[in-house]
Structures are given as structure tokens and as C-alpha cells.
Amino acid sequence: RRPDLALIDQHLLTAGWFTSTQGHFFPDVIFPHRWGRLSPSTRTPTNFNCAQLLDANIARRPIVVVGGLKDIDNSWRRDYHLVPVGLLLRIYPLAAPLPPAAGGGGEREGRREGAGDGEGDGGGGGEGEGEGDGGG
């Protein structure tokens, strides 16, 4: 068990039961609605979208994804972008300068890695948070 990592399958976040029954296993992750689910539509008061989940957690620890973000919802695209880090994609706010190791040299060069085109639906494709990698 690695307490510095929180590995969460993005598709499980879309299940209505996940945050209410499994959320307590992720005490360091803020779910915008503990009884809600990840959904592109936030018309239901308990639903939250990807941007809201990232907004709640991005300052807490690095967030990375494996296999790209799924096309569940694209709300994250207006404020975030993906930067390749080895086999992972780290999520950075568009407003923040990229570290030199991420190829940014502190300057914004636009979105990278297809800006979360949903490619590489990869079997384990989840969102992970952790030091050195997930927000995940």
C-alpha cells in the first residue's frame, strides 16, 4: 500500500454508488459531492464533472492519468492540459507555467498530447493521484 498514491478508475467514478461506498478509501481525495458521480451533466445536484474534480484536487498533489482521459466529459479542457511524463500524462492548469522538465521552460506552448483526446482508452485507464505522479 502506498499512502502517497490514490489510484481511481475513471469509469468507476461514473457509477452512482462509487463515491458513497468507496470514497472513504480515498481520504485525501476531495469528491465535489460525496454522494454523487462523475458525469458530463451537472444538472443533477449531486453530479460533478471532471473539471470540478480537478479543481478540488489539483493544488493538493500532482494528478496524472494512464491512457488519457476518457471521453466521459471534456469539461477539463477549458482549464487544464496533459503533459507526457514517461508513460503517464500529468495534468497541469493552463494558467500555471510548465516546469522545464515538462518541456515548457516556463512558457506556455499550448495544449499537448492531443489535449485529452480520449485516445488510448487503455484497460486500466484510471485517474491517479500521488506524489511524483494523480492527482492520480
Image (tube, grey):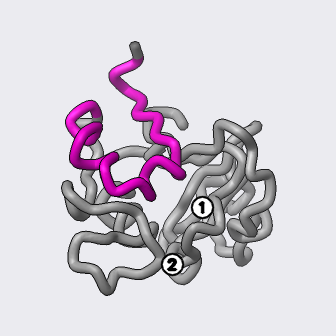
Above or below, 7 relative to 115: above
| Residue in view at x 20 percent, y 36 percent | 24
Above or below, 87 relative to 37: above
Magenta range: 2-25
Question: Which disc is residue 6 wearing?
Answer: none
- How packed is label 1: few (under 14 Cα within 10 Å), some, or many (20 or more)? some
Nearer mark to the viewer, of 1 and 2: 2
Residue 33 x %, y %: 22, 62
| Residue in view at x 52 percent, y 50 percent | 10
- How packed is label 2: few (under 14 Cα within 10 Å), some, or many (20 or more)? some
**Numbered disc 2: secondary structure:** helix
- Left-right relation of 37 to 39: left
Question: Which disc is residue 98 wearing?
Answer: 1
The residue to which callout 2 is attached is 75
Residue 99 x %, y %: 59, 54
Residue 123 x %, y %: 71, 39
Residue 53 x %, y %: 36, 62
Q: Quadrant of residue 48?
A: bottom left
- Left-right relation of 60 to 2: left
Above or below, 76 relative to 130: below
Tag 2 or tag 1, which sits nearer the N-term? 2
Q: Residue furthest top?
A: 1
| Residue in view at x 41 percent, y 54 percent | 15
**Numbered disc 1: secondary structure:** loop
* Amino acid type, callout 1: Leu
- Left-right relation of 98 to 103: left
How much space separates mark 1 and mark 2, taking CA atoms?
21 Å
Q: Quadrant of residue 43?
A: bottom left
Quadrant holding the N terminus: top left
| Residue in view at x 73 percent, y 75 percent | 109
* Amino acid type, callout 2: Ser
Could you say which is closer to the camera, residue 39 or residue 80?
39
